[in-house]
Image: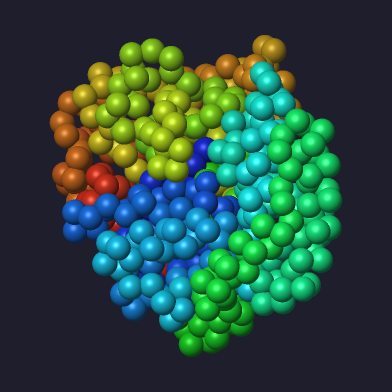
Amino acid sequence: MANVAVIGSQWGDEGKGKIVDWLSSRADVVVRFQGGHNAGHTLVIDGVTYKLHLLPSGIVRKGKLSVIGNGVVVNPWALMEEIETVRAQGVEITPETLVLAENANLILPVHPAMDEALEAARGKGKIGTTKRGIGLAYEDKVARRGIRVCDLRHPEFLKEKLEALLVHHNALLKGLGAPEIDLNQTHDDLLAIGEQILPFSGVVWKILDEARHQQKKILFEGAQGMMLDVDHGTYPFVTSSNIVAAQAATGSGIGPKAIQYVLGITKAYTTRVGAGPFPTELNDEIGNRLGEKGHEFGTTTGRKRRCGWFDAVIVRQSVKVGGIDGIALTKLDVLDGLDELKICTGYELNGEKLDYLPASQVDQANVKPIYETLEGWNESTFGARSYADLPAAAIKYIRRIEELIGVPASVLSTSPERDDTILVEDPFFV
């Protein structure tokens, strides 16, 4: 029996919500370990759609403990709003079912304000941030001026920390011509929201250590995707946290040996939201078809996703850097009806062939995909629950992806419904 970490292998939006929900039905504890409310996981359970941003996907399952780890930056107002929204859908959320790490850093009103002002100042050089203050909160965390959940228990100390933080940010806001943030108002607002979120706070590392010794199955739920990792992604068009599986340990307070299997969620084609390099992007009829059939709009932002052919180079890179043992291949059905499919097997840069995505922002913008063409299929794969239900050409496509990325497709997802899943290898029992 293994503890499992789930991460995205592309630029996010790979369909992690459904897979994590599917896995969480057999887990005892589900842990979010990085990111913030810029994440968006959509679950469809018994015809009911849940859109989650901060809450772990296990929250909709009875008898599961959901944990928000120290690696997550938490907007307390967004968290409470999400709790109330999900409660209104009939889900019970109490301090017995949800624990928030007491050492998690908070997103304050100044963070989205700074995010907005800085993105506006960048002009044509915009990063494509969601403007929710995620990166600014991580910046404060690293600069050691962040406000943490545990600080809300001490009003006077909280005010001292807030004052020091706002001296920094208000100077920048003033310089950017943006309104400054009021200290007293922020302090009062934090104390008020603190009354609501403090009952959920707990010592997460200790809770997880006890769960391990009780041999409970722990599922670590990542957000975004490996190509958005702040170290290993398409920098600077990335998120502000690490997405590699190793972050599951750091972002929750558990040793790396506690994670025995890493599942990389992988879309059968490629998408990304916002600015940044995208070697296999299709600005044509096929790209539009993938977007329409795949309903490619962001759960959090509603932004239209850019679509392209499957890029085996970036997924192979994610497998190696992220420690992925097997993939869950999603949205195979979106490719139904295409006469032929292309897979990117390498890049060309200045006359040289590459089998990896280079780190340089200039080089990433200039690589050209090298494609291999495969036969498509006209039969429907939607809702398939066994390999016997798949067309031969679809199986050939899957097998070629496995060869190119170096790990097996352990799970296949053929619709948003949780039971429309083909299990090849159970990550919990490897």
For the N terminus, the quadrant is bottom left
Q: Give residue 163's position: percent from left, percent from top.
A: 81, 59
Task: Give the camera-side residue of 381 and 76.
Answer: 76
Q: Give residue 55's position: percent from left, percent from top.
A: 45, 61
Left or right, residue 263 beside residue 161: left
Q: Give residue 239's position: percent from left, percent from top.
A: 62, 43
Task: Give the camera-side residue of 402 and 278.
Answer: 278
Determine whether 156 is above or below 366 in the image.
below
**Residue appearing at x 59%, y 39% in the figure:** 131
**Residue appearing at x 55%, y 86% in the figure:** 210
Determine whether 232 is above or below 313 in the image.
below
Task: Give the camera-side residue of 321 and 155.
Answer: 155
Determine whether 166 is above or below 356 in the image.
below
Residue 2 visible from this viewpoint: no
Q: Give residue 270's position: percent from left, percent from top.
A: 44, 31
**Residue appearing at x 32%, y 54% in the figure:** 50
